[in-house]
Image: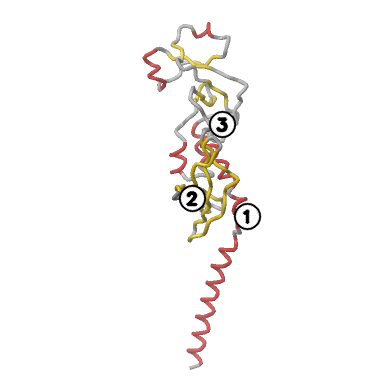
Amino acid sequence: MKRIFCILMVTVMCLGAACSAEQAETAAVDEGVFLEEIAPNILCLDSCELEMFGADVDFEEEYFCVYESEQSYDNGWGPVAKLYQEGEEATVSEYFPDPVMSSYYPVRNFQTNEEVRAHLEEFLSPEITEEKFHDDFLEYDGKLYLVRGARGYGAITCDKESVAFLEKQGDSYYATMDYLYFGDYDYTVKLEFQKKDGKWMLMQISKMPA
């Protein structure tokens, strides 16, 4: 009888310890700390929506491009032959000019698209990175350049002030955030975060029902 009682007591204590551990894990990241810790992930995501991708860009130094020929231009998909600045048109007169006159700005903190991708994957899952980033920079003469064409940029942004803790499920923590369209509310998303090697990683983005 004594033995059965001891076994029951040990079982109850183990169950209690397991519950306490689960409660401790849930309490380990309170809402305020969690939101503070995922702020870099949100900034990274917003930078992707702005098509900046974490780049430190010198907008004071503007370049334009030319192509080897009209055929090599390939509707803007062909390889750039040379970059030049305003006033240097005579040095590239034998090339085919970019019909849309896209602007190219040097990037200070990255030298290749692969470096940009590696930076994004510090905060975003490979799947999200692949969805948002498509080697959007020009690699030219050992440097990286941000491309800005005739279309508009910055219409879609993340409302960073709207980020709110939602819930915890298993190893995942969830938050909600609003997206803006030209500064006005557009829709809300659910963000899934997990800890990877001690750092928060944004794993998935899903649109919330209206």
What residue is pinned by disc 3?
110
Indicate whether 190 appears above or below 105: below
Residue 183, image quadrant: top right
Mark closer to the chain start, 3 or 1: 1
Residue at 38% in and 19% down? 74
Q: Are marks 3 and 2 in contact (CB under 8 Å)?
A: no
Q: Nearer the viewer, residue 189 or 107?
A: 189
Q: Nearer the viewer, residue 11 or 124?
A: 124
Q: Position of residue 82 (x, y in %)?
A: 49, 15
What residue is pinned by disc 1?
33
Mark 2: amino acid: Lys
Q: CA distance from mark 1 to mark 2?
A: 18 Å
Mark 1: amino acid: Val
Numbered tag placed on residue 56 in the rendering: none
Indicate whether 155 appears above or below 67: below
Q: Residues within 10 Å of mark 1 (few under 14, many from 20)?
A: few
Query: Which structural element holds mark 1?
Result: helix
- Give the foreground label among 3 and 1: 1
Q: Residues within 10 Å of mark 2 (few under 14, many from 20)?
A: many
Mark closer to the chain start, 3 or 2: 3
What residue is pinned by disc 2?
190
